[in-house]
Image: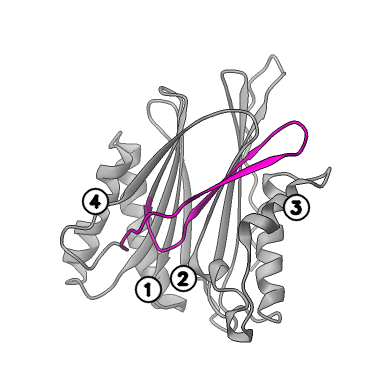
Amino acid sequence: MVIVARGLELHVAVAKVAKYAAGESGDTVEVIERPHGGLSLVLADGQSSGRAAKLISNIAARKIISLLADGVRDGAAARAAHDYLRTLRQGKVSAEVSIASVDLTTGTLVISRNTQCPAVIIWRAPADDFAVTLLDDPSEPIGIHPRTKPVISELQLEVGLFALLFSDGLLAAGRRKGLSFDIPAFACAHLRQDSASAETLAEALISEAIALDDGRPADDISAAVLAVYPHAGAVQIRKMSVRFPF
């Protein structure tokens, strides 16, 4: 997806794959335009995998998306989704949730986390120098504990900003062979390529994770990349494309 405002251009790309032989991914990713301008992406990872996990992640993502569409703030939407899931399933199931929102009113990227997975923030300078920040403050998944709330970070939108959100399947890729996936280092190496983009980075992250798992993903894996580029055109055309193999 491409969204343009204030001389900047936001690119959003998502890639995901199901656990090997599971049939259906238990992760859900949704994108919505905000009623006061901007865009929000929600990534929900349901407990376990397969159809049961998909039901849980759908419940969480749909609740958050519906509230965001009504103008509810991200933190309040995450808390409401937690209360809803905890009530519906009596505190017996959980979902890890990340929300990334581009707020055109404040000119910021707001990231809300209820997940063990960090958000990886990369600033790319013109000389291909990279500064990396991990948003990794401890946070709890929604649906279990009564006073769960998201950990929220806010970043200024500027050219060269990349934000990576992912489910724990990406974080755990290769672990059954004693390997680890250095996601920030891999992302920076990919971004040094001339053809690198939000879309190619999301796809490369998934491909590398699958390779680390010997072609048989040990868990559902999702990766979302938000990137800010300069926009030089006079006409602000917004675009979205989806590839959905079945």
Residue, disc 3: 190
x%, y% of residue 57? 39, 64
Q: Residue at 74% of width from left, 47% of height from top?
A: 191
Q: Closer to the N terminus: mark 2 or mark 1?
A: 2
Residue closest to the eye, 194 or 128: 128
> Which SS class for mark 2?
loop
**Magenta segment:** 113-141
Q: Residue at 62% of width from left, 55% of height from top?
A: 184
Q: Residue at 65% of width from left, 70% of height from top?
A: 209
Lateral position of residue 56 relative to residue 190, left or right: left
Can you name the residue that lies furthest to the right here? 194
Lateral position of residue 243 relative to residue 71, left or right: right
Mark linked to residue 141: none
Residue closest to the eye, 237 or 193: 193
Residue, disc 1: 47
x%, y% of residue 118? 47, 56
Mark linked to residue 79: 4
